[in-house]
Amino acid sequence: MNASFDDLVTAATVGLSRKPFAVTELDGPAAAVAGVLDTSDPATALLDAAALMTVARRAGYRPEQGIVSSPAAPEEAAPELSPRAERSLRQLGGAQLAPGFAAGDKELLADLLRAAGDAGYVASAPLLPDLLDAAVRTTALRPVVAAVLGVRGRWLAGHRADWQRVVDARPAATVPSDDPEVWRTGTRAERHAYLVALRERDPNEGRQLLAADWARLPADERAALLAALARDLSAGDEEFLDAVLDDRAADVRVIARRLLTRLPRSRFRERATDRATAVLRLERHGQRQSLAVTRPANPDAAAVRDGIDSRLPSPSIGLGAWLLTQLIAAVPVAAWTDLFGLSPGEIVALVVEPRLDAARRLDVHAGWRLAAVSQGSAEWAQALLAAGDPDDGGGRPPAAWPDDQRLAAALPPATRAERAAVLLAGTRLTPGPAAANQAIAEVGGAPIPWPGGLADAVMTILVRAAPLAALPRLPRGLLDQAARGLPATGGRDYAAELTRLADAHPQNWTPLVRKTAETVLLRRAFLEEIR
């Protein structure tokens, strides 16, 4: 065994007579030149060996031979972000593009990267390492960063395992999915993409492939793959979906019920409709129409299998109310218009009997709210929002009463923005905390950048607040969102208006207004570069 530096120290400490060693058998790079040492004097040879090994250690290590460098980065065919666009991106991304980022920066960065990707641009070379690092730290950024990496960015990511995870986060639709081997050996994203593509080519074969492997799949993958059957859903899928109602995973059963609800003549849909119409019926007394409610019985085994649950989501709701809500929520909302011959707006406006029991109306509307949210019905969501039910649903928990924000999420983006603008127009500058939070949440759910009507409504609130020494909750919340929401391009220059507002009304909070104006200007500079 070759002598190490520690061996030399030990020999010098205990004496060469007790621990002799051969100076020609040194460890490390010093071994190659140990032959120059004079071994006639062991003590001198030990000191020379120590000096030789010290120099060798300080000099570093001998490079390995035969190392082949990796291939050069491929040429990038897609247009790259210009230096001006890169500067705007770095300024807007701020600390997000460096270690220790601020959480608020990621939304702005994601907006701009998404816009660049949609315009066909890829990140410039100097940006790539910082973007990849940001996406490693922030999972939400991975899809938008992956979309602007280009071939060179993907090549660079391949040199580090954590960067490669960003590449793997690109949308499944971009993953090659026409090779049958992908189903057996691919990643989850690749398997999902393969199933989606197969469903488009041959829906029956796609379902049969999933059914054949169903028992060996983990629950979360079963849920993701089952949702892919929404493409080209047909009566041929009913038998498999009905069997999935017995799956051991609750999330999987929920998806199966949702798909069965979409099948016009499924047995599941018929069972749900029969149960609901037994407890809710339309009554006509001359020209007057109303809804009569009957207290539901405890669910039988078939109803439990179909998702009717006797376990209460909260002590604030009774068993009868919860069962009634579930029975109504299980029915496709379109079935009610067919059964009653009325529009959604007319149905939700009906009086619920008995009139003295106001909770019954909330139980019924809660079921329709749950159905509108789960089925994504914009028409029913709009009708229920217009009905003006209490936001808290009489104290019901979120599982039994989707609030107005969840309902509004089912609306088309333009309609949701219009609703937010109308809400702002009718809101006082200093409303109560609940009203202020609702207005801020409604605006936060609108599409980014805001349509002109909503942007103008926000500016009106800010103009009204400008003379105030302290910024109330509502305008402060809107100002926090305005940097992303106000249009950066178009006929109205919101950045200039904000600057004039700050100049005309200097307050301790006007630096926030100036910062918002600067952000809008930087967004404009970036967007002009990718036109």
Image (cartoon, rainbow, N blue to C red):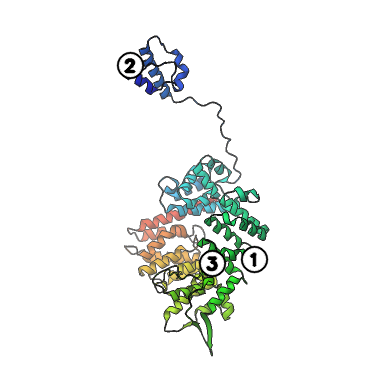
**Residue drawn at 62 percent across, 51 percent down:** 183
For residue 262, which numbered disc appears in the image? Answer: none
Of the numbered discs 3 and 1, the one sitting upstream in the chain is 1
Image vertical order of residue 93 relative to residue 343, above or below = above
- Tag 2 residue: 15
Q: Position of residue 177 (x, y in %)?
A: 63, 51
Of the numbered discs 3 and 2, the one sitting upstream in the chain is 2
- Secondary structure at badge 1 equals loop
- Tag 3 residue: 412
Distance from label 3 to label 1 (Cα)? Answer: 26 Å
Inspect the image, locate mark 3, and give the three-letter code of the amino acid beneath it.
Pro
Q: Residues within 10 Å of mark 2 (few under 14, many from 20)?
A: few
For residue 234, which numbered disc appears in the image? Answer: 1
Residue nearest the viewer, comparing 138 with 436 = 138
Q: Quadrant of residue 375?
A: bottom right
Of the numbered discs 1 and 2, the one sitting upstream in the chain is 2
